[in-house]
Amino acid sequence: MSPLLAGLTWLLVFQSAGEALVRLTGMPVPGPVVGMMLLFVALQVRKPLPAAISAAADGLAQHLSLLFVPAGVGVMLHLERVASEWVPIAAALIISTVLALAATAVTFQRLARRAEAAAATSRP
Amino acid sequence: MTAEPFFALWVYLAATPLAGLTLTLVMYVLAWWCYERTGKHPLANPVLITAVLIIMVLWLTRTSYQTYFAGAQFVHFLLGPAVVGLAVPLVREWPHVRRLAWPIAASLAVGSTVALVSAVGIGWLLGATPVTLASLAPKSVTAPVAMGIAENLGGLPALAAVFAVSTGILGAALGKYVLDALRISDWRARGFALGLAAHGIGTARSFQVNADAGAFAGLAFALHAMLAAILFPLAYWVLV
């Protein structure tokens, strides 16, 4: 069988398992996110990484942008509702996105440098 | 050929799922071409360009979103397996991720708090209605989670999805400028910030730029979705 087809089948199996778990437990998390965690655990046990799964996952990740297009077009349905409050909405979205990017990146880079410097000195 | 059979053919084609699916892929190929021609310029974001082109076509042909989505759903559906597949880059990066457990946890907490508080705070200062505020709160989280959270808070799920998608596009488009200005040279930090602030669309952008950035963006995206689903309703309830 083509590795891409086998890989896609595995991704769908794990997505289904994730959806089932969400339904059974009532977790407020989407099924695919839980499926991702299940696949992660499975891949920690089964090493090395199966070529079929990485082929399918990398193929989808390469064009992840395409998969967001239908949701992006959905914005057109709500333009009127947004129009009446466009100033606070635009300001909140733009400023908050910039602040969140900045705060996350600065925290990560500083702490990662410190963690790696500490690891380097403890293991010379 | 007279206009009549042509019109009949158009009516037939526009109503089949084939039209929405083909339109999505053709416009994406076009947008991708622009993106590559500009050297993957962040402002030439493929999600943004494709969506704008499609909205224009739908508007000009007076086609409803429902008709379009009948075809586009096949593309939309692949988001599920694509998110599951984000486990793969995470497995590849795992040795690094383990060493960086503390920076990851801290920047997740800081970024998530800043995203929530600043969105609601700015909206409130500028006089947004409570329904809009509740829909704005989860804007940095992936759309399906954001919709659930907004509903819990008394917002509108559809509006929350619009805000989440807009935030994703904004983050993917502006990320480079913000991160360059702050001199963030670590690809892992750049990816993690994009995945946290701009969820899946930021993750898509990260994969297009650098493999390490993509893996850390996928990690931030997934962690933020899980954290937000549990903690956001609690935090909002305390704040408001």
Image (cartoon, coloured by chain):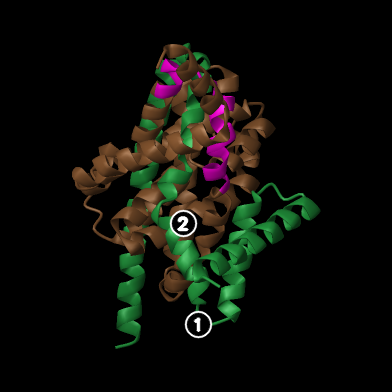
Determine if the magenta segment contains residue B66. yes
Q: Which mark is residue A60?
A: 2
Number of numbered discs on residues = 2
Q: Give the crowd class for mark 1: few <14, some 14-19, many >=20 residues within 10 Å.
A: few
Q: Which residues are magenta?
A: B57-77
A117 over B206 or under it: above or below:
below
| A32 vs B90: above or below | above
Closer to the camera, B15 or B187?
Answer: B15
Left or right: where B237 falls relative to B185: right
**Magenta-drawn stretch, dominant element (helix, strand or loop):** helix
- Name the colour assigned to chain A in the rendering: green
Q: Quadrant of the N terminus of chain A?
A: bottom right
Point out residue A31 in the picture as x, y percentages from the top left corner.
66, 52
Q: In the picture shown, does residue A120 fall above or below A5?
A: below
Query: What hue does chain B carry in this figure?
Result: brown
Residue B197, quarter of the rendered image: top left
Query: Which amino acid type is shown beneath numbered disc 1?
Result: Pro
Image mark for residue A48: 1
**Which of the two marks, 1 or 2, is nearer to us in this view?**
2
Give the crowd class for mark 2: few <14, some 14-19, many >=20 residues within 10 Å.
many
